[in-house]
Amino acid sequence: MNAYLASVIENVKARSAHEPEFVQTVEEVFSSLEPVIAQHPEYEQADLLSRMVEPERTFIFRVCWMADDGSWHTNTGYRCQFNGAIGPYKGGLRFHRSVDLGTMKFLAFEQTFKNALTGLPIGGGKGGSDFDPTGKSDAEIMRFCQSFMRSLYRYIGPDVDVPAGDMGVGMREVSYLFGEYRHLKGVWENGVITGKDFASGGSRIRPEATGYGAVYYLQNVLHHAGEEIAGKRIACAGFGNVTWGICKKAAQLGAKVVTLSGPDGYIYDPDGVVTEEKIKYLLEMRASGRDRVQDYADKFGVDFFPGQKPWAVPVDICMPSAMQNDVHMEQARQIAASGARYYIEVANMPTTNEALKFLMAQPHITVAPSKAVNAGGVATSALEMAQNSERLVWTAEEVDAQLHRIMNTIYQQSVEAAERYGLGYDLVAGANIAGFQRVADAMMAQGIF
Ligand code: GLU
């Protein structure tokens, strides 16, 4: 490996040994950059890569909230403003018990390149809390969001940092957060946070955008292989907002999602999550706060497999859409043996680096990386920012058409970037290179700081 690239990776490993997910994502992105670094000696001269792996700043704050029984609880809140070279920091807030500083750094780093890939002016950031929303009442969620925003509001703004949702943070939470920001500052301020409810300035199609975008990207991959999406069987992991969008768009296009998963196991529905009733039920399951996918099996009389993941089910396409590191070597081997021909990452970093390499080496499998596949969510957030600042409201058709165009461009750019550096049809390296190149250009132009 190129000596400069290797030394930066070694340095990150030594300094961030306590943040394994961050080390993992740096290694994954940088391992694609070999030919780029070789052609650009000026990056080493300016030590660009060392600056790219250090967040511009990170805020860590206390969040206190009262439960319905009157007891007080304290959590940690985070906002990591990783890279603002191409626009205001942009990225979601995650409420999940697993959240720590390392999680925030890996997600914000990944977000920087994803946002660059969209071609829109948005920098990379991420935030959240180790607060666990499972089983919390609506009033508890509201009080937590209000308290969280009381600490966060001073660090964000429409030209500074524009948060959104992520795991555990959907439209309800975003709207509570927005309400508290507006209350504290006394201004509407261009929406300041995206994924709001429609009446408060949210964009049409934003709830569906990540899932729809993933399917639009998938269509590009299928067309490249001379295939159509109609008739395809898809295995999804997760049953959240993103999976809901995938089910909806896949059903519209004549494909079917046959598995869903949760922390409790997975369900197999051979008829597919295709009817309006089933698709709507995903939203109910999520809103119940129970975080159990077994409820789907109980309601629709399909099989539930406790404690298992869905990757041995024979399908055409695998779309891991739950959370990071869901697919290790054991699952990757199952996928390789299951006959699936497309491995389309959807969640942020759903695959360990070892498993990803293994899947990419399978001649019968095409792999697409999450930072390209799931970028439709944040891209539509940028469209929400545009609507809010222009004081306009676009129709669902207008937003959907833009989203579709953006996903096609992301795919095309990734293909071209890999080809330009002699890597052939490599969607993983292509996405890393195209995202990196845009951030690198801006950072080089802005001088060293
Ligand atoms: N959390 C989503 C992501 O990972 C959306 C971020 C946004 O809309 O700003 O990209």
Image: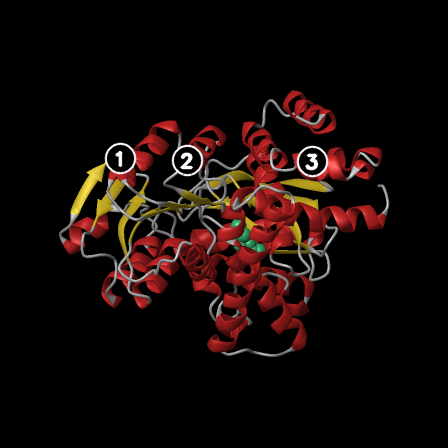
278 horizontally vs 199: left or right: left
Mark pair 1, 3: CA separation: 35 Å
Q: Mark 1 or mark 2, which is nearer to you? A: 2
Q: Residues within 10 Å of mark 2 (few under 14, many from 20)?
A: many
Image location of residue 424, percent across then percent down: 55, 44
Residue located 72% across and 54% down the image? 86
Q: Label 1 belongs to which residue?
A: 308
Name the residue nearer the viewer: 306 or 75.
Answer: 306
For label 3, the SS is loop
Q: Are marks 1 and 2 in contact (CB under 8 Å)?
A: no
Q: Residues within 10 Å of mark 1 (few under 14, many from 20)?
A: some
| Sooner in the amino-acid sequence: mark 1 or mark 2 | 1
Q: Identify whether 173 is placed above or below 103.
A: below
Viewport quadrant of the N terminus: top right
Q: Identify whether 249 is placed above or below 290.
A: below
Residue located 28% across and 45% down the image? 292
| Sooner in the amino-acid sequence: mark 1 or mark 3 | 3
Q: Label 3 belongs to which residue?
A: 53
Name the residue nearer the viewer: 118 or 122.
Answer: 118
Which residue occupies the extreme right position in the image?
A: 447
**Residue type indicated by callout 1:** Gln
Q: Are marks 1 and 3 in contact (CB under 8 Å)?
A: no
